[in-house]
Amino acid sequence: MATMSQARSFFTAVTLLAVQLCTGKLGLLCGSTLGASLVACEKSCSIWSSSGPVVQRGSSFQVYCTFNCKCKGSMYSDHPPTLQNHIELNSTTIYFNVVNITKNRTYSCQCNCPPKLDPCGLDISAGYLPDRPKNITCIYEVINNKSGVVFCTWNRGRDTYFRNSSELWVRTVSGNHTSGPQAHKVSSKATDLLSVNFTVSRSVHLISVWVHAQNPLGSAVSSAINYALSDIAMPSPPVLCQPTCSSRECIIKVNQSVRTQHLEIQYKVAEQTWTSYPDQGLQMSTIQDWSISSLKPYRLYHFRARSKFSTGLWSHWSTNISSWTQEEAPAEELDVWYAEPASHLKSMRIYWKEANNSISRGKIIDYKVRVYSSDSGLDFVINLTRDARNHSVPICANCEVILWARNSKGLSPPARIIARHTKAKFSQDVQATAGNHSVTISWRKPETAPLPTAYVVEWYPEGHKLEELRWVKLGRNDSQAVITDIKPFECYEGAVYAFYNESSVSRTMFAGVTSLEFVAAPTAGPLVQEKVEGHTVTVTWTELPRSQRGGCITKYTIYIENDSGYQQTYSVAASERMYMIKGVSPAVYSLWMTASTAKGEGLAGQKLKFFIQQEDPLSPIIVCGVGFLIVPVLLCLYQSSAVKRKFWVLFHCLKLDKVPDPQNSKWAKECTQEKGKMNLQLQLSNSSFTEEEEVLILVDVEEVPKQNSDTSTSTNISSQLPTQISLSPETEPATLPYPLTTYIKSLSHDSERSDQTQTSLDTNTTTDYISSHGLENMEEDDQEEEEEFAEMLGFFPSHNVFIEPLGFGGKLTLDAVKIDCSDFFKNS
């Protein structure tokens, strides 16, 4: 019983599983092995096409669906499924009209009511019938003396969008025997050109070939083509061995599988075109040496070869082989130029171009430079490395510079440079014309002057002659040079040299040259500095870096803008680096600059701030007012004779080169006659005295006997005097070891040595001394003028030179003058 119960449970489970399979709840496909073995799954519909599953592109047809359910059905196409507008044929069948199909499509139908049954579907493949094969070409490559291989190719035509099958059918004729057609199948390829090859015996002399193509829509057959194998026979490519070369000849060993009647060898250098060596006729052996002559030294030559029978086709080219020819000594002198030195320099820089293989004819090892002068005896040689392209050499008036290049076989011919040239009086009319990719430098030949023997055109980036000098040498009949190696956004300058003989040359400069293609506005503005002096602003700036110029700078523009927004511009030539702006009104200003090229104005540089200060309008008015007040007062004072006299006294005292001798004065002579005392009235200018406090100061002057003292004694007396003289008129002077004497201090030393006294003592001359009462005999007019002068001392500075003893240098011959100065200070 237990066994039957288990069997029933298993049967029930299988039945439920079958139902789930049919309803699709487990996600399995109906019609699977398990489902078929358990229960028959029911499809919701059946689908078909009126033209079948394979149709031609561009055709129209109908797709039908017949449903097994009683519900309404629908039709879909492609993935994801898209609902189509179908047409109902009857209660169980619908259809859809497909018009001008252009690609493969998928159609499906399903019921729209439960239980949900499996949909039905149909894949439609669309394509074309195969084209008729055309352009059948066959080549017979002879492998050896027994057999060869026939290679046939043809064009299959357009793509049919199906997997085609193509077959080449071949019928052969050997003598009187004709073999039946034999097919050689070709698998489908994506390319339009199909090919097949097959082996043929050397006994076959005729073949007939045609092509059969087929796909699901149909088939196509080409017409048959007949070939005589002798017409399409070609030998296998020759095999070349490595050549053995001298400087002008290479010997090549050629191997062939069969003997041929023609052999062609070609050679070339680098990217040049191939050159054919002449055919030497019938080949007597399959291995033969060939000599290729008329080659050039130190060149890398490439070789290839092909062969042909007396009839038929040339073989394919052999694999290329390469070899260098050997070196020879350089054939020509180097292309040499120089940077013309300044007249004060004793050296110049020479330049040379790297010679190409046709000139160097070998690998350059080094360069040799010799500087020679028969006049000065200068003669030395410099060896330079193979990478050198310029060198500075010392020069003299008649020096000659010689340059050689050396390879493993020897030296090149010498290239000579004359150190100093005589400047010719003739000049060229040089013009520079910019093109899109180049610059043309042209000149006009002189009509009356002698024609030059040669020209040299040099050019270089502006300001970089020594680093990037370029040149080209031209003949006497040339009148222009086209410069093509122009760097982008670079400004060039240069010169045209005309040589009239070995030492006479003229030079015409040109500048501001660049190609039109490489011109742009500057990408930055100049760096600016400003200096303000009053109402004048001095603007200085630095040159833009080469990478920011965009070509040749044509001008600079200075912008200044005040705080009110008023703007002024100043245009400056491209060669300038400083500009002065005068008459700038007081305000706060912003300043910046731009640079321009032929393309336009560039970006602005950084902005600077500066300030023009307002002048105080009262200052000139005050100065003018004081001037108007002082001038009349001085004019009035000058009317007084005392002022005039004192002025001239001051003038003569300040004059150091000529001092009058007091001994020769009229006043001194009158004093020596009386030999008494004379009152000397002086007006002190100390600020502590007033007009009411004027005091008459009496000075006692005594005669002192002649002293026989030397110069050193005089000097000691002069240095000790200030501390030994009593300033009180009532006090008797102390007994001194020398006569009491007061010296007059020179005004000319007042500022330099105020603490010293200039004295003049003559040991051989006796001088009478001035009496203190001598002034009583002076005219009253002079005394009045003294009083007038004292009143006017208030206009002068408080420090008065008359308050100190006066000493006159120069020719002063009074041995000693005793002046009692106590009266100067008795009222102080």
Image (tube, rainbow, N blue to C red):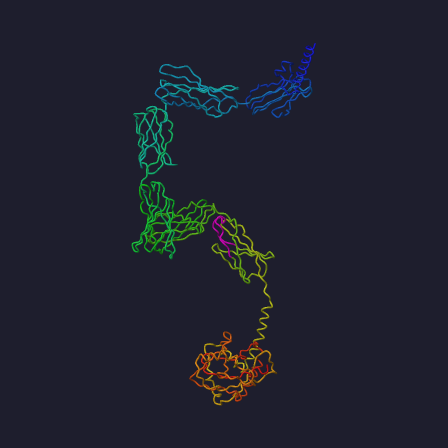
Q: Is residue 545 magenta?
A: yes
Q: Nearer the viewer, residue 644 or 303?
A: 644
Q: Residue 343: which quarter of the image?
A: bottom left
> Is the residue 728 above or below the residue 534 in the image?
below
Q: Quadrant of the C terminus?
A: bottom right
Q: Position of residue 108 (x, y in %)?
A: 62, 21
Q: Residue furthest bottom?
A: 674
Image position of 541 (left or right of 353) = right
Q: Quadrant of the N terminus?
A: top right
Residue 270 in percent (x, y) is at 38, 36
Looking at the image, is 422 positioned above or below residue 636?
Answer: above
Task: Say if the magenta span includes residue 184.
Answer: no
Q: x, y (%) of residue 752? A: 50, 74
Q: Give 365 or 673, whichever is nearer the viewer.
A: 673
Residue range in magenta is: 540-557
| Viewer-closest of 365 and 358 | 365
Residue 161 image offset from top left, x and y in percent: 52, 24
Is 601 rendered above or below residue 236?
A: below
Question: Going by the image, does 80 lie left or right of 337?
Answer: right
Res. 274 image quadrant: top left
Furthest residue in direction top, as rendered: 1
Looking at the rendering, which quadrant does residue 109 occupy?
Answer: top right
Q: Is residue 356 visible?
A: yes
- Count of all numbered marks drawn on residues in the image: 0
Q: Is residue 448 visible?
A: no
Q: Nearer the viewer, residue 496 or 207?
A: 496
Does 1 sit above or below residue 111?
Answer: above
